[in-house]
Image (cartoon, rainbow, N blue to C red):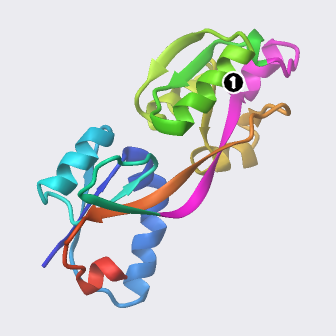
């Protein structure tokens, strides 16, 4: 039977692919179906109604029928397009750039809101998808706080620059499944 996985766009695009490759190397031959979840409520609903066997999440799911455990921390970085930084005389002050916010939930939301408030920054735009925010930053619309895994190649090739006064942020990547769910060999792997 197929293994049905719920994941956000970011998780499916950047975090899940290496895991799926490792499963192939281990000889796990189950079909894997990845469903993109637009938000945490869709992830929770999919687990509860058995549309998903497991979910990979980057927020805490608060439901007594869901078991969730952390896999690892993913770092977030404050980035801007190199050309936009050059247009601002290489300023390291994030207040000098239009800020593009990512709609977050849980502890990550509270931390980012506190940083933005402390630095007296007002978001110009807000997205609910990290990939869309990344595209806007790459186009030079403004600066944003993004998962490192999304921007790593652009930092390496110099397209994007990380602010020196980078907020030390991370979020937990976790796996979740419904309580009482029988764990298949593919799920265990």
Closest to the observer, 149 or 154: 149
Q: Secondary structure at mark 1?
A: helix
Q: Is residue 119 above or below residue 63?
A: above
Q: Which residues are magenta?
A: 70-93
Closest to the observer, 48 or 157: 48
Q: Quadrant of the N terminus?
A: bottom left
Q: Is residue 1 above or below residue 173?
A: below
**Which image quadrant for residue 162?**
top right
Q: Quadrant of the C terminus?
A: bottom left
Residue 166 point in image, percent of width and height? 78, 34
**Which image quadrant for residue 100?**
top right
Residue 43 point in image, percent of width and height? 27, 48
Closest to the observer, 24 or 103: 103
Determine the residue positioned at 31% across, 86% down. 28
Closest to the observer, 131 or 94: 94
Residue reaching furthest bottom? 27
């Amino acid at each position: 039977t197929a293994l049905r996985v719920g994941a956000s766009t970011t998780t499916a695009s950047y975090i899940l692919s290496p895991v799926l490759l490792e499963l192939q190397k281990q000889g796990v031959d189950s079909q894997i179906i990845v469903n993109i979840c637009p938000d945490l409520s869709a992830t929770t609903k999919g687990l509860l109604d058995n549309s998903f066997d497991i979910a990979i999440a980057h927020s805490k799911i608060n439901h007594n029928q869901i078991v969730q455990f952390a896999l690892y921390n993913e770092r977030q970085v404050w980035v801007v397009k190199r050309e936009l930084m050059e247009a601002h005389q290489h300023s390291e002050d994030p207040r000098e750039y239009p800020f593009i916010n990512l709609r977050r939930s849980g502890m990550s939301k509270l931390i980012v809101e506190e940083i933005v408030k402390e630095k007296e920054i007002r978001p110009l735009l807000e997205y609910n998808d990290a990939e869309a925010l990344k595209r806007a930053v790459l186009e030079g619309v403004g600066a944003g706080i993004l998962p490192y895994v999304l921007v790593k190649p652009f930092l390496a090739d110099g397209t994007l620059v990380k602010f020196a006064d980078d907020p030390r942020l991370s979020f937990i990547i976790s796996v979740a499944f419904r309580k009482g769910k029988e764990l298949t060999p593919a799920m265990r792997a």
